Image (tube, coloured by chain):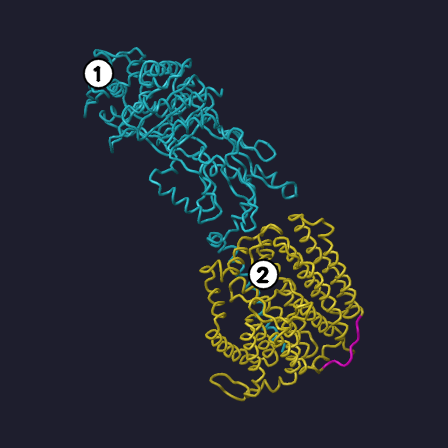
Chain colours: A yellow, B cyan
Amino acid sequence: MSAATSTVTSPAAGRSARRREQSLLAGALGVVLLAGILLLGANPVDPWPVALAPLLVLCALAAGVHGALRVLTPRADAVIVPLAMFLNGLGLVLIRRVDLAEGTSYAGSQLVWTVLGWSALVVTLAIVRDHRGLTGLSYTFGLLTLVLLLLPLLPVIGQEVNGARLWIDLGPIRIQPGELAKLTLVVFLAGYLEKTRSLLTVAQHRIGPLMVPAPRHLAPLLSAVGLSLVVLVSQKDLGSSLLLFGIVVVMLYVATARIAYPLVGLVAFAIGAALAFRMFGHLRTRVAIWLDPFSDALDSGYQVVQVLFAISNGGVFGTGLGRGQPDGIPFAHTDAIFAVAGEELGLLGATAILLAYGLLIARGMAIAVRARDEVGTLLAVGFTTILALQVFVIVGGLTRIIPLTGITLPLISYGGSALIANHILLALLLRISDDAAAEVPA
Amino acid sequence: MTRAVRQVTWVLFGLIGLLILNLQSITLLQADELADQPTNTRRLVEEYSVQRGPIVVGQDAVARSVRTGDDEDPLAFQRIYPGGTRAAHVIGWDSIDVGRSGIEAARTDDLSATDDSVLAGELAALLGQGTSTGATVRLTLDPEVQAAAERALGERIGAVVALDPRTGEVLAHASYPTFDPTPLADHDRGAALAAWDALRTDPGRPLLDRATRELYPPGSTFKLIVTAAALEAGLTPDTAFPDDETYQPPVGQPIRNYNRGVCASGGSINLARALEVSCNTTFARLGVELGQEQIRAQAQAFGFDRTIPYDLPVADSVFPKEVDDAQLAQSSIGQFDVRSTVMQMAVVAAAIANDGVLQTPHVVRDVRDATGRLVAGPRAGPWSQGRFGSEALSTRTATLLQEMMVGVVDRGTGSRAAIPGVRVGGKTGTAENPADESATAWFIGFADQSVAVAVVLPDAGGEGGGRLAAPIARAVMEAALSGR
């Protein structure tokens, strides 16, 4: 499994993948268009040309991205872009829906971020012609990860919003560097693990029934745990902390196939979390809300309770777009947007969204399996895990599987940093899949 | 590496699967429990996003919904009752915290436009054609008659029902003490609940509709039913009875007259005169001689032991089952366990005035959607039910009984109900309340075939029927006549 040195483009394979993508894209846009028309029907405040213009922008964007892919990654996976377009477009409709209820105007800027996001995808594909090139810079990316994570802690530019210190203020725009840190962490780990995986695999020490590697080889794992706990404590960001930890554990396990890593990591994280729980009041509040949101339904438990009311009110078929009550749900544009989908699209619509993520996970993991080199596999696993864990942390938080923590729903929630980071992530997945489909000359 | 990737894939699929399962649990298993949470206002907001239709009496909306226009209030519409206490027991209330009552409850589907028949309007609203507004419920209440009834009742505990005998339309339906439904509809839950608690714990029981929900001993007004049974059995107004100071039934205590003397000059008294002076000994004797089956059958023909199909729930009036002769003698003068609602006695008066035919009493004239299209007509027409035809008594009997009741007003205990130049018939009643010295005073009667009325004053003194109840009935009948 050494890196391929030369590849030959098969015009036939490329044409077939892009043709499939074309019809899938048409289907995805069709669904988004239908959702837009239904919303317009329920809330005829905008004249229809104004209301449907963003959807035309989306169609033009899809055509442009599709054209770029024909040139840049002709053999890349055919399902990823249509799925992303579906989620992204549905997100726009849902954000517009919340705008209508709350008198805000986030949908317009989300449309701008959408254009920038898909542009970032194309630019990333244009720059990164071979994902193996990233590994040469893996320590740079490691350092970058630390910098990005710690930026919000800086005075002046660092900003605390809604109780979590995740933002930096750059004059006209405010960005969340943590969103990009997830990507740089994956790139760093892929490069690092590719080089050290043989060392990490060898177990030399026995602790009880477990064979564990030498302590120095546990260092990256333990530092990752430490890092996520630092994030948890310093930025009060439980969601990102879980996410970072999950990425490290999953990638370590894939690289070494040793169950000891996830187990040791889990124990270490549990101890750390327990200590943090004892030390920090806001964490205890979170857990108390999780266990019983109804005892303080009008104050601390308000968001979770409103989310549950919304989703249960939707029932199986939903109230229909524009006919629910998203106005009462805090953070309906961002963290709680899944509750809006649950109420207005019902169990069926919400399940469809989750299945779309499931399909995205399946494609990402298939790319990981097909990748022609270990770096490609590790990158694809890492990126896919980011998406999957984000979905689990936010939807699980909203529906009380785990304590609720603010984190965006990939591609759907309002938020520029997240949208751009996710598009770059998709670009790299496309790049690896294109590489995997290339034929090695006999 | 592939194996590990596959394992991770299954774990991630497992997480998504867990989310889907949990979502099913919330929408399918926990939905009802969540909907019932006290802080869940979603159903309310949905309900109050529709402009509930008005309830109309005459030309005026006595209940209607207006926009709150308050950004702090999540509910778009506020229910108001411009008439205050006017006809409150009929109109009822539509409250967030204490539910609904009256027509607000009985016709809530029409008013809130969720009824299928208003679906066309909903569809129009869906397509952006105007707003969704509930149907209008128009009542048969005559504003003048209702006002007269409430005015005449004043601050005396009691109830009045006035019917149009020919149609069964309820012209007045009043009960005192009463209440103002407006505070109950307050969106401020604390205020609404405080108002509710005050009404609920008020010893005067203002929320009780004494016209339909409370049973009273009908006293001497029940003699009309005994008389009807006697006439149907072939007796005539001239049939003579011994005029004794007491009547000794085959078993039990003797029955005395009200004044503890004879009813006429002693010797004998005919049926018509016995009714005019409300002679207890005559009717006790008559009841025992006719037998309980005859009396019970006549009472049931008028609606006793049955449920009156009114637009609002009415308690069933009762004639006791299996009585001995002592009890039958008591029952024949409306004592013992005979119990009646005011609505039931109004139906009795109306059936007699309408030549024996029972008309279904109803207070809803019609239901029309926001465009004026008829959604539902009145629940009216002759009231027949199973083995009971709509003919409570024969035309001949009814005509005789009318004449006898006119005699009661012209020459007997009901003189205070008389209206010059109008053919007014009636019957007074004064039932002793077993618990104390007070008595339940009644008057039931009619004026021509235009109006039948029943009045009850449960806390009146002796002679209350003729002295207190009859003038109330007269005021109500006058109002009804002047409007026709």
Secondary structure beneath label 1: loop
Residue depicted at x 71% and y 55%: A30
Q: Which numbered dot is residue B262? A: 1
In the rendered structure, the answer to whether residue A267 lies left or right of residue A83 reads left
- Residue B133 locus on image (x, y percent): 58, 39
Mark 1 residue type: Val
Q: Which numbered dot is residue A331? A: 2
Magenta part of the chain: A3-10
- Residue A102 locus on image (x, y percent): 61, 54
Q: Chain of mark 2?
A: A
- Residue B318 locus on image (x, y percent): 33, 30
Residue depicted at x 59% and y 77%: A248
Q: Nearer the viewer, residue B265 or B152?
A: B152
**Is residue A427 among the parts visible in the rendering?**
yes
Magenta-drawn stretch contains A154? no
Secondary structure beneath label 2: loop
- Residue A114 locus on image (x, y percent): 70, 63
Image height of A324 relative to A238, above or below = above
